[in-house]
Amino acid sequence: MSFLWLKQYMPRGIYGRAALILLLPVVIIQLVVTVLFAQRHFEGVTHQMTDTVLRELALVQEVVEAAPSRSVVSKEVAARLGKLEIEVVSVTAADVPEGNLMAWYDYSGRVSAKRFADNMPEFRAVDLIRGNAVRLFLMSDKGPLKIVFDRRRISASNPHQLFVYTIFFGVLMTFIAFVYLRNQLRPIKRLARVAESFGRGRHEPYSPAGAVEVRSAGNAFIDMRNRIERHIEQRTLLLSGVSHDLRTPLTRMRLSLSMLEDDEAEPLIQDVDDMQRMLDEFLNFAKGAAEGTPEPVVPFDLVTEIVAEAERAGRDVVLLAPEGDGRGRVKLRQVAIRRAVDNLISNAVRYGARAEVSVMLTDKTLRIRVEDDGPGIPEDRRAEATRAFTRLDAARNQDLGGGVGLGLAIATDIARAHGGVLRLGESQRLGGLRADIVIAR
C-alpha cells in the first residue's frame, strides 16, 4: 500500500516535522487513556450508581402500587421512603417528553438512560438538562409519574478532572519537550544557514555545536568548505600565473612585429591580439565569482551602468523598463555581476544584430535577462554551452570573432555563486537566444 499521497499533507520544515513526531504520540496516548477511562472506569462507575438508584426506584414503584389513589402517591412515598430523598409527582401524558433530554456531551447521562431503559419496562424518558436534578418519567398503574432525585446519585462527582489533568500535563510536557527540541534543532538550522551562505559565495564563521551527529556533520562541512576554498585558490593561482607568464612573450612578439611592414605584420598582430583576448578570458574565468564582497545594490541601477558602458563601446543594446520593484536592493558582488552581464551582452551583440536587457525584481527572486536576434542555441545543446571551453560552431559562428568558450561558463559560475542559476532559452521577442540570470533573494 502506497502512502505517497500523505506527503503533500506533511510539514516541509524540520520544526514542523519534529513537532508532528512529538505531538502525535502525545495525542494518541491521551485519546487511548480517555477512551479506556470512559469505557472501563467511568462507564462502570455510572452503571454501579445507576443500579443502586434502580433498586431504590423498585421500592418507590412498590409504594406507588400500594397507594389507594393517584392523589396520595406523593404523600405515601414521602412518608414511607423519605430517607431516599426521592420526590414523586403525578403528571399528565402531555408532560412526558417524547425522548430523552440531555446535552450532546453528557456521556454519563446517555449511559444511565440506556441502563434505565434496559431494566425498567415502565421507563419513558429522562430529563437531564435543567439544573443538577434527574427527572425520570415512568408509566404506572396510577398514571404517568415524574420522579426527581439528585444527579450526583447516578454520576461520579467531578469526572472531568481526569480529562483536565490529562490535557494540562499533556500541554505542559509538550511545551517542555519543544523547548529541548528547539535547542537540538537550532544547530542544524545554523549549519543549513551557513551552508547556504557558502553556496552564495559568503564565508560565515561557524563552529560545530549540538548533538554528536550534528557536530560530526558540522566538522565534515568545515573540511569540505576548506577543500573547496583551497581548490578555488589553487585554480586561480594556476590560471593567473600561466596567463601572467604568457604576457611577457606576447609583448615581445608585439614589439618585434611593429618593426615589420604593415602588410606582413597585420595578420600576425591579429593573432597576437586574439591570444591576448584569450588570456584575458582565462584571467576572468580564474577570478570567477570570488572577486569583491556582497553588498546591497539596486540591480536596475547596476544594469543601467553596464548597458551604458556597452553603448559607449558601440554595441546595439537597449535596456527595457524594470519589472516589479525597480528600486529594491539585493546583496550582490558588483564586479562579478558586471562581468556576467557584460559577457551575456557581448555574446548577444556578437552573434546577433541587437540585444535587449531587462531586470525583474520580486519578493523572492531577481532576474536579469539578455535577449538577442541571433541564431540561438538548440535546446539539446544548451547544457553543453554553459560548460567551460565549449564552442558551438554550428549554432554560434566562430568566424564572427568568438572567444574560447568561457563567456557562458563564467556567467553560470557567477550565478551559482550567488545562489542562483543561468537559464538559456528562446527569445519570444527577438527570436534568438534568451539568457536569464535568476538569483533567489
Image (tube, rainbow, N blue to C red):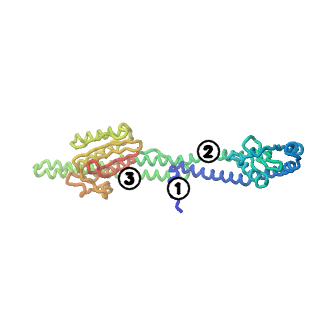
| Disc 1 from disc 3: Cα separation | 43 Å
> Local crowd at mark 2 within 10 Å, few (<14), some, or many (≥20)?
few
Q: Nearer the viewer, mark 3 or mark 2?
A: 2
Q: Nearer the viewer, mark 1 or mark 2?
A: 1
Q: Position of residue 436 (x, y in %)?
A: 33, 48
> Local crowd at mark 3 within 10 Å, few (<14), some, or many (≥20)?
few
- Which residue is situated farthest in the top direction here? 327
- 379 versus 143 height, above or below: below
Left or right: 401 in relation to 76: left
Q: Earlier in the sequence, mark 1 or mark 2?
A: 1
Q: Earlier in the sequence, mark 3 or mark 2?
A: 2
Disc ID at residue 6: 1
Q: Position of residue 289 (x, y in %)?
A: 35, 47
Circle 1 — which element? helix
Left or right: 67 in relation to 244: right
Residue at image coords 31%, 58%? 380
Q: Earlier in the sequence, mark 1 or mark 3?
A: 1
Front-lying residue, 362 or 61: 61
Residue, disc 3: 231
Q: Quadrant of the C terminus?
A: top left
Viewer can see residue 175: yes
Residue at image coords 33%, 56%? 383
Residue, disc 2: 175
Q: Position of residue 134 (x, y in %)?
A: 77, 45
| Disc 1 from disc 2: Cα separation | 26 Å
Q: Position of residue 125 (x, y in %)?
A: 74, 49
Front-lying residue, 441 or 127: 127
Circle 2 — which element? helix
Circle 3 — which element? helix
Which amino acid, mark 3?
His
Which amino acid, mark 2?
Phe
Q: How many marks?
A: 3
